[in-house]
Each structure stands twice: as structure tokens, then as C-alpha cells.
Amino acid sequence: MIHITLPDGSVKTFEASVTPMDVAKSISEGFARNVISANFNGTTVETVTPLTTDGSLVLYTWNDSEGKTAFWHSSAHVLAQAIEELYKGAKLTIGPAIENGFYYDVDFGEHVVSEKDFKAIEDKMLEIARGKHDFKMRSATKAEALDLYKGNEFKTELITNLEDGTITFCDHSTFTDLCRGGHIPNTGIIKAVKILSVAGAYWRGNENNPQLTRVYAISFPKQKELTEYLELLEEAKKRDHRKLGKELELFTFSQKVGQGLPLWLPKGAALRERLENFLKAAQKKAGYEMVITPHIGQKELYVTSGHYAKYGADSFQPIHTPKEGEEFLLKPMNCPHHCEIYNNSQWSYKDLPKRYAEFGTVYRYEQSGELHGLTRVRGFTQDDAHLFCTPDQLDTEFKNVIDLVLYVFGSLGFENFTAQVSLRDPENPDKYIGSLENWEKAENAIMSATIDKGLNYTVKTGEAAFYGPKLDFMVKDALGRQWQLGTIQVDYNLPERFNLTYKGSDNELHRPVMIHRAPFGSMERFIAILLEHTAGNFPLWLMPTQAIILSISEKYEKYAEKVLNLLENDEIRALVDHRNETIGKKIREAEMQKHPFMIIIGEQEEKENKITVRMHGGEDLGMISIEDFSKIIKTEISKTLKPF
């Protein structure tokens, strides 16, 4: 007999070789019908895997993220089978589940796959799915695996790097694929599929390797869910920050400047400046000091910090100066520079904490295929800050940073979020720097502060930064998509590497603790997400133009300028549309530019010294005084922008 512990803490006793599906049926036949994946003792298993020892079992349905992963991983096998049957000679490589759906990288040889082929692939996938074929795992020797993929250099390369005795395949229908496991019970659960797009992708992400075709797709257990998802995609296209950024004249890119290096246009630069000033004001109240560091640093700086060992090979390569042996790097992180600023003076425990903040631009060489608008770029500005404190101050300082992040989210309309505590992977210590003792202290500090602040949180093992654990904020936007925004990290390691010290009350030198934090994260990425979340309708306090003044004819231009001056004196951002166009066209274009308020100026308005106000979206506020309009603006702003 074996004892199976369920997530609620209950323990059930079964005969050895019971399967996860048997356990599910013992709970409820209705529940078992929805179970599609399982995890036993921390390892993903099939629902038919025999369990032979005591252990903890988690059963997943489609409603669990792990269940979706198994569903989409299994669907990738069905996609691969459909491609193999439709395109003779195509070479399959890898096909993982991703955040939304899955993909398969394929060498199609002489075949060219485009949108016109999508329906045929979808039809073939559904035909296979309707066969209700079981997914079955089996082991194979290295020799058998290599023989199966004779002629497929991609699979052969994967197998060559595996140890004999660890190789497994998954079979379903007439199809076999190299696989580690984690499937739904059978193909029949897949009821709806959609090929989303195709793109180029280098084998194993290396530009020196052959280019493959990546087929992106998604699947669902119900057609209704696919329909809803496609409607969501259409809305996402309308909100695409690249499209809105162009329409609102915020930013652009230039091939001559270089891929992944955004150029901020006047309106976008003003938007960024308002965001920066907003955070600077809150930081000043919280006791931060602004610093500025250069865009480059000597290679040795990043060798000391550990960044070069971790990222050097995949980043911009060293800059060689006329002096022999002298090398500089484009700054990949701000923290080493801030460590050196701290080291400029000898501090006492009475001086701490020191809080250095900077809007510092950093550079990382993202592969060209990974670049995407403002969300993945090669040069970006972090709202970075590093706090140096005593161990006794760590808890308070960490909680104060949480408060700052929550203030930022509240002021910008991000209300739906969870916290993610990212810890090190104890099975892979080589991924991290520093002692086990320091890691345990840092992880305990984050867990304690997170619990004390009452945050709704999850724990992710293996997601820590290489120098310390972190608290990330996972925000859901208006379309329900999840983004990582805002991060706080506890670091005992860089203070050691840079020999940072302070003099304690015992007159001895001690090591400070370092907190890394960035509420926005990257200014570029944050603005992209904010654009898509708001569809360009930013909070009123942030809008580039809060009101546009539209005169019915040139006769009222003088009064329009008077209104503009009065609004500007009241610190309301407004502009006058001087163009010789009809008022209807001016209103339509003001709507497209998403101006929150349109002020209509004509004979009656000038005569009564008032303005007619129309809101973005069509609501008419009628004719009111300029003073009343100013009050409306300030009242609306006060609803979101509160003092820190």
C-alpha cells in the first residue's frame, strides 16, 4: 500500500501502481473527467503513470496553468503530426507550450508555408484529434533514437546530447516524437485549434544556425473558448502599442540608427518626462537621492559584479580603446556603478540607509528575432534605485519599497495584480553567486515582508536573479494578459564583491545589505504595456494634451488663444487646432488622437465668455465657464493621482 497526499493535506491509501487518474476517480467521477495532467513529488507525470511510492499528488484541469501547459504541449504533438502528413520531407525540431498556445519549429525544405495553408493544417489537426488517440510514453536506447531520426540533423543533435537511459518518446496514433512527458490523456480532448502565424526562427536561437519556420498555434477544449480568444486578439491588435505609438506620434524606429533602439518623438518624450517627474517626486519624499552614471564602464567593473560572466557572451562586445588592453562595455546594468558611488565615502550606521536612484539607460544585445516594439529592445532606461542598509533596516526598507510600487500602480490604473516571490533553484547552485547562508537570509527577508504586507503572492523556484531572490509584481491588463511590472530584489552578494562596508555602533566594519528596485522596470516596456492597457487613453494627469481647442472659424481664433492662455495659467495642458478645416473633421481627428476633452469655440461661447466641452467618446458637457472646466480637470486628476 502507498499513501498519497493531496493539496488540501488529506492522505489517501491505495494499492501500489495506482495512477493519478485512479486517484481522481476516487475523489469524484465528475472531477476525474476534467483532470488532464498531474504532478507527483514535484515532477510532471502522465495521468496514467503508475505511482509506486508514497508522495504528494496535484491533479490539474484546464483551469490550471499547469493543465493548459500539458494541453498545449500535447497539441504541439498533433500539430507536428499534421505537418508531417501534409508536407512530405519536412524535418521536425522542437515544439513547446508557451504562455498562450504553442509552436513547432520546422525545416519545411522546398515547401513554403503561408496564411493560405493554415486552414488545411487546422483541418488535419482536428481530424487527428477526433481519433481520440492516447498519448503513451516509452523509453528508447540512444541507438534506437538515432536510428529513428536518421536524416534529421536537428533531432539527432538533441539526442546526441542526451544520456543513454534517459531518452523517452511519446506515441499517439501513427506518430512518434522525442519527448520528456507531460500530456493530456488523449487527443479527443482537443476540440478547437487555430494556426496564428508563421515566423522565421534560428535553430536553438543561434543566428549562425539554419533558419527554420516557426508555426504558432493555440488550441482549446471548447470552440466557444477559441472564439472568445480570437475576439480578444482582435482587440489586442487595436491596442498594439506599435500601432498606437505611431498614431499618437510617441516614438519611432530607424534602420539607420539600429534595430531595437527607439527614438522618442516630442509627444513621447514629454510623456516619459511626466512619468519620470511623477516618480522623482515620490522618491524625494521617500528619501532617495538622484545620481547619474555613464553609459559605459570598464570591463573589469562588470567582471567584479558577475554580470560579464553571466551575460558577456550574449551582450554587446567590448569597446577597445587606443590604449592596448583597455576595454569598456556598454552598461548592461546600473547596480555596479551605484556600488562604486557608495564606495566613494566611508559610512557610519548612522548614515544608513543610502538610497540612490537613477533613470539609467542600459544596453543588451537581444537577438533580432526577439525584438518587439518597445517591449524587447536593445537600449532601454530603467527607473533604477539601489538602497544600502543595515540588516536591521532591511525589513522596513523593503516594505517601504512595496508601498512605493503600489502607489505607482494605483496612480496608473493597474489594479489587478499578484506578487511573485522568485527563489533560487537548490538543484542548480551554479546558476547563482554567493553563499547559501546569504541566500537563505535574503529569501527569508522577502517572504517575511511579503506576508506582513498582506500581498496575494505565489512562489516560483528557480526564477531568482543570479545574485539574489526577488519580488516581482505580475499585473493583468485590461485584456486579462499578465505582465511582469515592478521588481524588488534583496542582495547580500554585490556588497561582498565590491567590498562595501559601514562602521557599526561597535566601531567595527560591517557589510551593508543591498536592495535593487524598479517600479516601472524599463521605461520603454512600461509605456508599451500602459499604452495597450489603456488603449492610449492614459490617466488624465499623464495625457500629453488634456484639452484641444477647436474654433468653428478663423473669426474666433483670438478668443481661442485667450482660452488657451487661461488654461495654461491653471497648469492644464492644452493646444489650439489652427487648421482651416471643418469643425466636424477637427472633432473626428481629435477623437483619433484620444484627446480627453475637446473645447468648441464659436460665436455664442465668445459672447458669453464660456466654452462648450465635449469628452473623448462623445459625451457632451455643454457650455460652461473656463473656471468650472478647470475644476473638472483637477477633480478627475485627484481621483487617480494622490500624494505619496
Image (cartoon, helix red, strand yellow):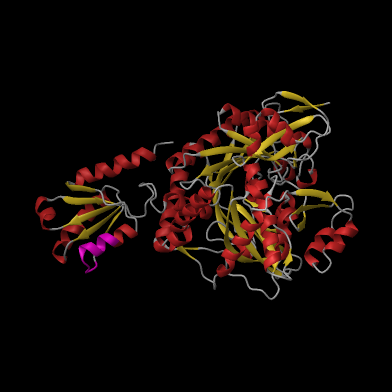
Q: Nearer the viewer, residue 618 or 105?
A: 105
Q: Nearer the viewer, residue 623 or 358?
A: 623
Asked if residue 275 shows in the view, the reply is: yes
Residue at screen point 53% across, 61% down: 373
Residue at the bottom extreme, as displayed:
110
Say above or below: 272 vs 253.
above
Residue at the left extreme, as displayed:
607
Q: For the N terminus, give its image quadrant.
A: top right
Answer left or right for 143 relative to 408: right
Q: Which residues are magenta?
A: 579-588
Residue at screen point 25% across, 64% down: 585
Say above or below: 328 vs 304.
below
The spot of residue 394 in percent (x, y) is 63, 32
Check if residue 587 falls in the magenta segment: yes
Answer left or right for 222 relative to 92: left
Say above or below: 260 vs 139.
below
Asked if residue 442 shows in the view, the reply is: no
The answer to which image quadrant residue 76 occupies is bottom right
Magenta: main secondary structure equals helix
The spot of residue 418 in percent (x, y) is 55, 37
